[in-house]
Amino acid sequence: MSAPPLTFRRHSVPMLAIKGTYRLIGSEPDGDTVHFLPQDPGFWCDVPGEHRVERNSRGGGKIRMEGIDALETHYSGVGPDSVHQPLCLGAVGARDELISWLGFSDVVRGSDGKVTGSTPEVVPGFVLTSGADTYGRCIALVGRGDLPVNVPNGRRIDVTPSLLHQTANHHLLSLGLVYPTFYSNLPKELRLDMTATAQQARATKAPTGVWAHDVTTTGTTIDDLKSITEHQVILPKLFRRLADYIRLFGPSLTCFPAFLAGEGEEFFLPEQTTSVTGLQRVVEIDGNTIRMTRNIEDIVLVEK
């Protein structure tokens, strides 16, 4: 017997403030992921929620940025080889802007894509987090430099829109370099602010951003995997599901709704107070053309 649908939580969720440093060497950063070492790694134990942050030998962890989703530059999924979204249409734009915004320059990468050098090697910063995901990544708002004077290190605070605006999450969203992607732990006030920011960026359609090329809701025709890795820009979450499906079953979309149903992703829509399950509910397929019937900011996903 399946579990009953969830009721949307609308209360504010305080976030834990952690001061530390960012480091690129040895990692393969993208537009929504970066490595962070707390000044006191013991604060990882204070990150709320049932999932624990996975730490490396230095005590650092991987940050998955809250509320945004960047085009994929190296997605493995069903593997064994990684795939990416169209590099010439902005897949590296968010990554490069994030690296520059944090304060890094002269980034050198090896043949495997991992960073081998940067100037400087580390930069100061802070994160604001309300939990970790099932992969051990800390889900957070990413800040640079010192914590604001009224934000104590290692304490949980209610994050305001003005503090949100000091983060890379807001910066990348305002430039249209990333898509909004919301989970139900994100406080409603911040979600609404990020929604407005994303909608303004969509209206602007900066040529270097995703919105000038996005075909998520207008529709994209799938001939083969290259349709979404080389030619068409779509929502990264839809890209990941399509990339896995095509690599497993081929480009025919006949069974894709069943594949999405099997993923069992739970989410809320604005007109609903209880959750629904399966992204096939917001996807329309006509032959080999697919489109989402709702803008991504209308969807609030449930954390697993």
Image: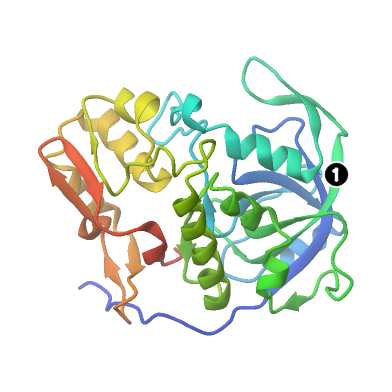
Q: Nearer the viewer, residue 151 or 303?
A: 151
Q: Position of residue 25 (x, y in %)?
A: 77, 31
Q: Nearer the viewer, residue 274 or 78?
A: 274
Q: Position of residue 205 (x, y in %)?
A: 47, 45
Q: Against 260, is 212 above or below?
A: above
Number of numbered discs = 1
Q: Position of residue 258 (x, y in %)?
A: 17, 49
What's the residue type where badge 1 is placed? Val
User: From this viewpoint, is residue 134 visible?
Assistant: no
Q: Nearer the viewer, residue 139 or 195?
A: 195
Residue lying at 69% horizontally and 33% vertically, measured from the top left: 27
- Horizontal side of 292 relative to 68 (left or right) equals left
Residue lying at 47% horizontally and 71% vertically, measured from the top left: 184
Residue at numbered disc 1: 123
Q: Quadrant of the C terminus?
A: bottom left
User: From this viewpoint, is residue 45 visible?
Assistant: yes
Residue lying at 74% horizontally and 76% vertically, measured from the top left: 156
Using a 10 Å C-alpha cutoff, classify the residue at mark 1 as few (fewer than 14 neighbours), some (14 to 19) or many (20 or more). some
Residue lying at 47% horizontally and 63% vertically, measured from the top left: 182
Q: Against 126, is 90 above or below?
A: above
Q: Position of residue 48 (x, y in %)?
A: 64, 71
- Horizontal side of 149 relative to 23 (left or right) equals right
Q: Against 170, is 17 above or below?
A: below
Rendering quarter of residue 215: top left
